[in-house]
Image (cartoon, rainbow, N blue to C red):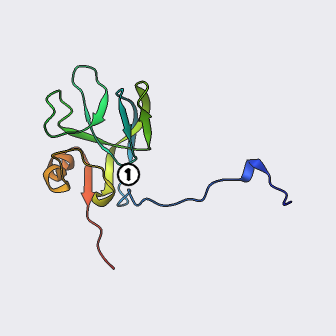
Amino acid sequence: MPNVNPIFTSTPYTPDRLIGGDLKLVTESVTLALGQNLLRGALLGQITGSGEYVLSLAAAADGSEVPVAILVADTDATVGATVTGIYLAGEFNDNAITFGAGHTAASVKDALRNLNIYLKSPVPA
């Protein structure tokens, strides 16, 4: 049996290619609203009344229809609102973003640029 030191064991790193450039990433901790189970890279909007974040849907009418951030890590808030991290600025691969219904990279790109969130399409080699 090999000598395994639990301090130095880890799972293999698998890059997801969410980060799309060298622009400084700005993060913040926020509350993801109850009922959300989202993957890293989800495009989020903020509910005006509660201040909580949800997947931004174009047809929403609670403020969250306006995308304002990108989720840093997979977050499960199905049993209760959960504190998680968001990106408030940076360059991101638009193919790695999860868009809510009614949103596409083309439909949100200009508005996100005003927030210093830049969506970039990968350039083939």
Q: Residues within 10 Å of mark 1 (few under 14, many from 20)?
A: few
Lateral position of residue 30 relative to residue 118, left or right: right
**Residue shown at the point (26%, 61%) measured from the top left:** 120
The x and y percentages for residue 25 are 38, 48
Q: Is residue 38 above or below residue 49?
A: below
The x and y percentages for residue 14 are 51, 60
Q: Is residue 47 above or below residue 98?
A: above
Q: Is residue 122 above or below residue 93?
A: below
Q: Which residue is mark 1?
A: 24
Furthest residue in direction bottom, as rendered? 125
Name the secondary structure under disc 1.
loop
Say which quadrant the C terminus sits in: bottom left
Lateral position of residue 48 relative to residue 22, left or right: left
Q: Amino acid at mark 1?
A: Lys
Say which quadrant the N terminus sits in: bottom right
Place residue 121 in its image quadrant: bottom left
Lateral position of residue 68 relative to residue 18, left or right: left
**Residue shown at the point (30%, 68%) measured from the top left:** 122
Place residue 74 in its image quadrant: top left
Furthest residue in direction top, as rendered? 49
**Residue shown at the point (15%, 46%) measured from the top left:** 102
Lateral position of residue 67 relative to residue 79, left or right: left
Q: How many marks?
A: 1
The x and y percentages for residue 77 are 41, 31
The x and y percentages for residue 60 are 16, 33
**Residue shown at the point (71%, 53%) measured from the top left:** 9
